Amino acid sequence: MADSGVNATAAALLGLLHEGPMTGGQLMAAAQRRLGPYWSMTRSQVYRELPALAEAGYVKLGKPGARSSQPYAITPAGKRAFARWLSEPAGRESLRNPVALRVAFGAQQSAQQLQDVCAQAVEQHTAALNEAREMVREAKKSGDDFFASSLEFAVGYHRAALNWLKSAPSK
């Protein structure tokens, strides 16, 4: 846990709540839409962090809505914690690529297995690259240069992954 008292997932939720109160489901949708091209967040992470943020006084619960959904709103203390988190060093990123892991153990697989893994990865990265490019265009069109810049990371990542996949051994 950083000096701010929040981890990256909690900080992402606080950042999203700057847009206004949201339920856990709405936060998941916003995270996927806004951060998904370069930052993954699971439903279990969201629902684990929200009570902790409420207990810390960083978010407050609103009135329950349909199907017992409850909106969360960021508090002034939450805004301060988010600002502290933003001022901290970003830290070391952790890379976990399931395709690279499988290639690392290529000697224990058949050529067909490796080819299938790489073909699926090419398909996924191609689709993600096209989606990220479109999102960059939309962000630039709407004048959101910060969002566009963060999405450019996703474009570069998928390009790099596709280039790597071209050279990955298949036996």
Image: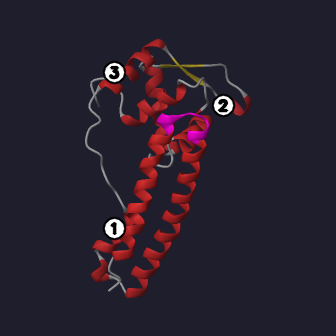
Label 2 crowd bin: few (<14), some (14–19), many (20+), radius 10 Å: some
**Which of the pair 151/67 is nearer the observer?**
151
Magenta range: 139-147
Picture coordinates of residue 159, whole percent (x, y): 42, 61
Q: Which mark is residue 84?
A: 3
Q: Earlier in the sequence, mark 2 or mark 3?
A: 2
> What kind of element bears circle 3?
helix
Q: Position of residue 68 (x, y in %)?
A: 68, 30
Would residue 69 appear left or right of 106 to someone viewing this image? right
Q: Residues within 10 Å of mark 1 (few under 14, many from 20)?
A: some
Amino acid type shown at disc 3: Arg
Residue positioned most to the top: 76
**Residue appearing at x 44%, y 20% in the figure:** 55
How far apart are the two marked residues, 2 and 3, measured between alpha carbons?
A: 29 Å
Q: CA distance from mark 1 to mark 2?
A: 39 Å
Is 145 drawn above or below residue 54 in the view shown? below
Q: Point out the frontmost of discs 2 and 3.
A: 3
Q: Amino acid at mark 2?
A: Ser
Mark 3 or mark 1: which comes first in sequence? 3
Query: Distance between the Cα atoms at labels 3 and 1?
Result: 35 Å
Pointers 1 and 2 in contact (C-beta within 8 Å): no
Location of mark 2 (residue)? 69
